[in-house]
Amino acid sequence: GQNIDQPTEMTATEGAIVQINCTYQTSGFNGLFWYQQHAGEAPTFLSYNVLDGLEEKGRFSSFLSRSKGYSYLLLKELQMKDSASYLCAVRPMTTDSWGKLQFGAGTQVVVTP
Amino acid sequence: DTAVSQTPKYLVTQMGNDKSIKCEQNLGHDTMYWYKQDSKKFLKIMFSYNNKELIINETVPNRFSPKSPDKAHLNLHINSLELGDSAVYFCASSQEVGGGYEQYFGPGTRLTVT
């Protein structure tokens, strides 16, 4: 079965750093994605990790440890526009996975002035 | 230049009706998806097509029938709508199946069944 856990909500102030953790238990592993979703809008791609380590993209970084079934998304220099839901999604490796993504429930990040 | 578009954006209908949602992508992608996002914000895959062939068919009532007339279009038809079908339905596409290819999502269709 698939189980993806992430915190429900996090609050941080503008300019600060926030780390959103994601733990997963899936049937095999074939990559982990982070998406951002503003209220009432579509999810948009942030990052992809398939090997252990840190991927950095501007203010956003994503880390993966496959042995621990763990990832985090790091948001630095928070801006008000970063207030959104952040979705962790895992692609399991099964014979019928065919690109299927399993999404977590999302972490609502609230940035305060 | 809309990458993935869906129509309609909002759909309000009564129980028992049949409705369709259309999706088009102009990215030249081979793979398209339908997702359902419920009130708890869980995003769940329903179907996926690769080059017009069905490749993912999750446990979805057979009242839901996807149709892909060509690889740029993936429509979703829903028969005998029920209250529990109320949700936001997202269409998405990706260049290929698998790998690190990101999925591009459409703006969503908010379906309300009364």
Image (tube, rainbow, N blue to C red):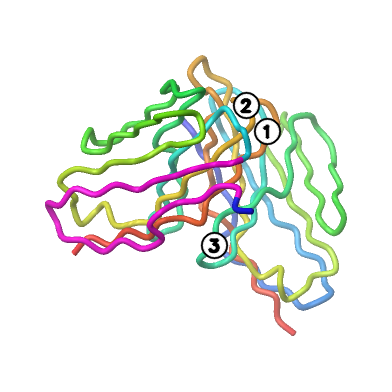
Q: Nearer the viewer, residue B72 or A34?
A: B72
In the rendered view, tell whether residue A57 sits above or below residue A102: below
Which image quadrant: the C terminus of chain A?
Answer: bottom right
Q: Residues within 10 Å of mark 3 (few under 14, many from 20)?
A: some
Q: Is residue A58 left or right of residue A31?
A: right
Question: What kind of element bears circle 1?
Answer: loop
In this image, B89 relative to B65: left or right? Answer: right
Q: Distance between the residues labelled 3 and 1?
A: 21 Å
Depth check: give the residue in front, B8 or A36: B8
Q: Which of A60 and B99 is in front in this view?
A: B99
Label 3: chain letter: A
Q: As drawn, is B82 to the left or to the right of A69?
A: left
Q: In which quarter of the image is residue B14?
A: bottom left
Helix, strand or loop at disc 2?
A: loop
Marks 3/1 same chain: no
User: Are dots 3 and 1 in contact, CB under 8 Å?
Assistant: no
Check disc 3 and report the residue beneath it: A41
Please determine whether, in this image, residue A50 is positioned above or below residue B91: above
Q: Give the range drawn in magenta.
A: B3-26
The residue that disc 2 covers is B96
Task: Provide the major secondary structure of the magenta segment.
Answer: strand
| Residue type of the residue flagged with mark 1 | Tyr
Q: Which residue is farthest top?
A: A95
Residue located at (30% from left, 35% from top): B60
Mark toward the start of the polypeptide (2 vs 1): 2
Cα–Cα span, label 2 and label 1: 7 Å
Q: Tell which subunit mark 2 falls on.
A: B
Residue designated by label 1: B101
Above or below, B63 relative to B54: below
* Letter of the chain that mark 1 sits on in the rendering: B
